[in-house]
Amino acid sequence: MTFARLWPLALIFASAALAQPYDILLKGGHVIDPANEIDRIMDVAVSGETIARVSANIPAGQAKKTIDATGYYVTPGLVDIHAHVFGYRGWIWPDDTHLTQGVTTVADCGGSGWRTFDEFKETVIDRSKTRVYAFINIVGKGMVGPRAENDTTDMNADKTAEKIEQYPNEIVGIKTAHFSRKGYLPLELAIEAGTRTNTPVIVDMQVLTHQERDTETKLLKIFRPGDIHTHMNSDRQVEMVDRATREMQPWMWKARERGVIFDVGHGAGAFIFPTAYDQMRHGFPPDTLSSDLHNASIVKTKPAMPNVISKFMHFGMSLQDAIYKSTVRPAQAIKRFPEVGTLGKGKVADVALLQVRRGVFGFNDANLRRMVSTKKVEAVMTLRAGELVFDAHGLAFPEWDTAGDYGRIP
């Protein structure tokens, strides 16, 4: 065939390619993108790994694959800043347990320390589809049990800071947790490293009389603005809500005013309904929603992000606010916004498709008490960097042909 005959065909193929500038089009969904103040029916177009366009009535013919999102909510991929994907004996693989819940970004909360972070990066961060960040533990060995986490000789602010400076893109902060000896030494060392590297500290520290610690001192005198108090809804946070009066302690409001961030960190033992209910009714909601998902909590309390959102919606939080506290706010807390947590044009195409089911649904807390709700949020689809990585309802695939078209094996 001569060039003259091939030329019209080339024009046809070129025109077809130009007519389909998008790889994936999510059409007709209710977009909730707090970063861009979008809360209405719109279409989301993806080209390659990025968001190409968010607009009403994008023609289906402009995309290679169009997915009908009618009746679903389209949001930025959820951001979970308290997860366990390394080190801790209960860690779980993020691609199996987070991408299936609409979560595209996680921060491992203290599994690795300055001694073990390189292994974490090589074995998990570099190999998972999920975007994985780390709160590095002030303990060099990481979160590997009481003996290590009480070993003050393995806590080193300088080495922790050096590791953060070595990996500024992957490490977003410092974790201190589970210290059962007296005093604030681990927290003080974590603050020292955080001040040197301009990163936040996330703290899970028991407050018991014999440990000579109290929440007021921790939040008002040691914490800096931007430091994160996790497990805020647990039974151990009796100093946040007075058990006798069920009122918020006055220093909690002062801590929030000075910029302390309050995080859920649900987990298996860190969320009970009375604490969450009292905080919500007093107008003290969490700043960030997070799961503390690990191999015990995933079975016991099922705190995947959609379930955490569902519980707070039952206590009066709107879906829009819950999405804000699961996207923009946690991304801000770890200083990764607006690179993360938005459907803005040109940003990485991390997208969650959610549905809100109506009916009768049971949820439980760490005390294994049951709560019945009429709404449940569930993840239906997840795009990570433009790749379809989860599709619960098969929305991205054509209907099978009852006439007997067997198609081809992919």
Image (cartoon, rainbow, N blue to C red):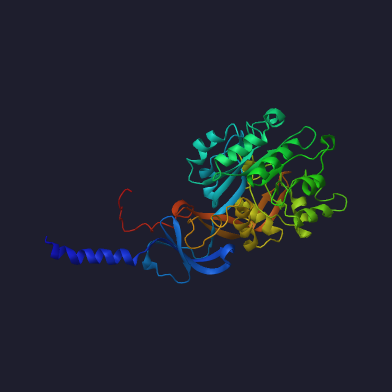
Report x, y in % for residue 189. 71, 38
Q: Residue furthest left?
A: 2
Residue 237 seen by the camera: no
- In the rendered image, which quarter contains the N terminus? bottom left
Report x, y in % for residue 337. 58, 56
Q: Residue furthest right?
A: 244
| Number of numbered callouts drawn | 0
Q: Is residue 360 above or below residue 140?
A: below
Foreground residue among 292 and 197: 197
Report x, y in % for residue 140. 63, 32
Foreground residue among 219 and 224: 224
Q: Is residue 307 above or below residue 236?
A: below
Is 24 placed left or right of 243 in the picture?
left
Foreground residue among 223 and 149: 223
Report x, y in % for residue 290. 64, 49
Foreground residue among 35 and 88: 35
Residue 363 seen by the camera: yes
Q: Residue at x 50, y 68 (%)?
A: 42
Q: Is residue 393 above or below residue 189?
A: below
Q: Is residue 307 above or below residue 87?
A: below
